[in-house]
Amino acid sequence: MAREHFNWRTFLRQVAVIAVPVALQNLLTTTGSMVDTMMIASIGQTEVGAVGLCAQFSSLMFSGYWGFVGGGMLFFSQFWGAKDDEGINRSYGLTLSCMMTVAMIFAGLALLLPETVMRLYTDKASIQRVGVEYLRIVGFAYPLMVFSMAMASLLRCTGQVRLPLYGSIVGVVSNIALNWVLIFGRLGLPAMGVRGAALATVLSQLANILVVITLARRAGHPYLLAVRRHFGWKRSFVRLYFRKCFPILMNEILIGLGNMVINVVLGRQPEEAIAALAVFRTLEGLIIGFFAGFSNASSVLVGTEVGAGHPQVAYARAWRLVYLCQSVIGVLNLAVIALHGPILRLMGMSGASFELAFGMICIYGAASLIRMGNWTQNDTFRAAGDAVTGTVLEIIFMWVMVLPLVCLSGLVWKWPTLAVFALCYADEPIRYVLMQIHLYRKTWMRPVTPEGKEALDRWRRELKENRAAG
């Protein structure tokens, strides 16, 4: 069989249309987080560490609902490829309902049991006290964050990538302005410190949502505001949805719990290490922000073709997206390492905390090249219908290899902070090799649409016949 020509120019244009707005949106969010950190750092390292640990609690919530985002995008993209409007509406309503359930649980914990949350993450009483003040306000933002994420996922999968970007611009600008006013007490208002940062987060999330809804209404988006069509679920569809979402959900929950254990171990390090970790997590968000653009591109560009019945196109896009993502992340890592000095000083790092933060950046610079390749492959598999393979590999290696090494090195052997930190990524090279083997075997395409199933069966028959012919 002659090898089909792959149009790189069209491919890169399609990637850019999805990846660039998503990357810009995440870059804006990360920039806002960096400005937050810089403002809070002017108050003290204790405050930086406390807000950083609260961000880890938010990340645990992220793990709780991201399984539904991944499952939802699987259905959004494949139904979009098959032009199934009813399928898009039903899957969005079910995804939103599940995500908001998770958000309300975490909001309840933050508002009603903040002391318990902070005691879990650190044994430093001064950091616990500041964190409790922050959680009691920022908990109101959790449902808003999740609602915004659900809308963004639907819009990106249905060709409206810019609307979430516009919402983020308003959200980040308002967050920075409100931080300046509320943290330091400008314009005649009292200085609220970390409580002001939390309140600014709540108000800016609300502004983000209002902008997205307003723009979607003006653009006449056919799915986001069709509320009456979101909740007419059939039992067979709900079963299919949860069957596809369950592996992703278990992956995110178990990985989220594993990351919580890692953060608990790192939270027992010296205070300067906790402050350095908080700053690193903000910079990590910059890398992940760019990665998220490729992740969304993988989900949409591959999932749409699988659902539309073009498996050969989906495969051609999939492996190229992995290597393209790794190349871009590598360049970005080099830029962050080169500029680490002014960045870390602006974010309040000095002395031991500066050295630790720089060490974390260097370790992550090497690890993330492989890590982002693994994530892109996993997101590609999920969008194509295979929610199991990446999930099983990630869970097994996290709980059998990474967690024992981190816990032993941090709590028993008392290794230096950077050595413990490096062990967080010990499994990535092994999983990368296994994921690459799975990628080239092409068994990860498992459509949910009739068009996709029929075309995949036909393509596999053709491949088998060609292999038999020589």
Image: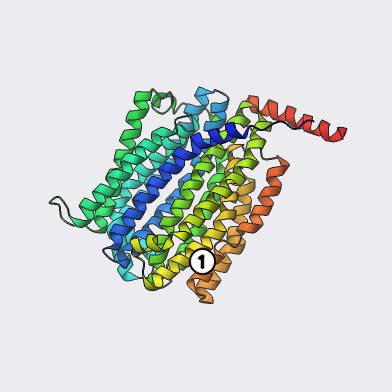
From the viewer's side, name the closer residue of 115 and 150: 150
At a point 51% along the width and 72% down the height, the residue shown is 410
**x and y, in percent, of residue 205 in the image:** 32, 43
Q: Secondary structure at mark 1?
A: helix
Q: How many marks?
A: 1
Q: Is residue 13 left or right of residue 62?
A: right
Q: Which residue is mark 1?
A: 421
From the viewer's side, name the closer residue of 16 and 209: 16
Quarter of the figure with residue 406: bottom right
The quadrant in which the C terminus is found is top right
Q: Tell me which colouring the rendered structure shows.
A: rainbow
> Can residue 188 be seen?
yes
At a point 55% along the width and 56% down the height, the residue shown is 368
Give the residue at the far left of this rendering.
188
From the viewer's side, name the closer residue of 4 and 300: 4
**x and y, in percent, of residue 440 in the image:** 71, 43
The quadrant in which the N terminus is found is top right
Quarter of the figure with residue 15: top right
Q: Is residue 370 left or right of residue 188?
A: right
Give the residue at the far right of this rendering.
469
> Can residue 205 be seen?
no
| Label 1: few (<14), some (14–19) or many (≥20) C-alpha neighbours in 10 Å | many
Q: What amino acid is labelled 1 in the image?
A: Phe
Q: Is residue 355 above or below residue 430?
A: below
